[in-house]
Image (cartoon, grey):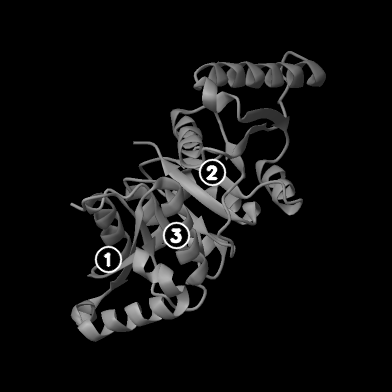
Amino acid sequence: MAEAPLVLVASDLGARSDRVVERGLAMAGATGCGVLLVHVLDGAAAADPARLERLQAMARRDLGERADKVEIRLEQGSVPATLARVALDVDAPVIVIGTARFNSPVDFVLGTAVDYLVRRSPVPVLVVRRRSSRPYERLLVLTDFSNTAHSALEAAGDFFAGAEIELLHVYGAAHPHRLDAEASAAQVRAEAEDEMELLLAEVEASLRGRITARVEEGDLEQAVEERFLRGAFDLLVLGTHGRGRVAHATIGSRASALLSASLSDVMMVRNH
């Protein structure tokens, strides 16, 4: 067990990995932790001292004096299982990963190592897509009023203490039965607003003061994409089930589409 918590950054210091390392350093600064950069290899290569020396040299080249703040470790085995294990070993508050090895958001989520990691990670997983190390200042947190979504909101509040948060619930069009369409739509909206009010009542006052709550009718992916297209937010936060695939996230079972719609970084929080 490490003496102090370490932000776990999964990287090989290759192409496009700079954004992941930069974000890991920023997260470490925000949480008061150090940084552990883990490169997981299959086979016997992980035991090669020369490979570790090359990674250390690359870190000095790319990070300069900040390389002293980064511990580098080579591990051997399954990438997601190893990252989950190391996160426990070092008491990591978050795992920071990138998307460079995946061709599309669908490939990124469904049936990949990241899917496995999120399902088993003991801590939130931050997926870095954009090159920026500035603090996240505007967060979009999605809710369907489940316990998992509530965990995601609390994690957002804890990790990003100074950030403004929009808490968004998007509901689909009502299906009228005995009521006419207008009355049915009004009823669905009223129920969603009541749920939002109950949720906010359970949130600590210090966090509630940073939240703007919105209830909208429409398509969830479109609502998310529109907000990120106009640059309204820096980070999307959503909760995922501890069991099943990432695509079984509580938010409409559409995590893969949401990753695409965000156009930015995404933090996925598993409900334990």
Q: Nearer the viewer, mark 3 or mark 1?
A: 3
The CA distance from mark 3 to mark 1 is 25 Å
What residue is disc 2 on? 237
Q: Is residue 159 left or right of residue 261?
A: left
Residue drawn 21% across the image and 82% down it: 49
Residue drawn 48% across the image and 56% down it: 26
The CA distance from mark 2 to mark 1 is 26 Å
Dot placed on the residue nearer the N-terminal end, 2 or 1: 1
The image quarter containing residue 134 is bottom right
Residue drawn 61% across the image and 41% down it: 140
Q: Nearer the viewer, mark 2 or mark 1?
A: 2
Dot placed on the residue nearer the N-terminal end, 3 or 1: 3
Q: Is 35 in front, or is 100?
A: 35
The image quarter containing residue 218 is top right
Image quadrant in which the C terminus is located: top left
The image quarter containing residue 271 is top left
Q: Is 13 in front, or is 84?
A: 13
The three-letter amino acid code for the residue at tag 1 is Ser
Q: Position of residue 193 (x, y in %)?
A: 66, 19
Q: Position of residue 139 (x, y in %)?
A: 60, 42
What residue is disc 1 on? 78
Q: Is 87 in front, or is 194?
A: 87
Residue drawn 59% across the image and 61% down it: 132
Q: Position of residue 259 (x, y in %)?
A: 57, 53
The three-letter amino acid code for the residue at tag 2 is Val
Q: Secondary structure at mark 1?
A: loop
Q: How many marks?
A: 3
In the image, which disc is placed on residue 244?
Answer: none
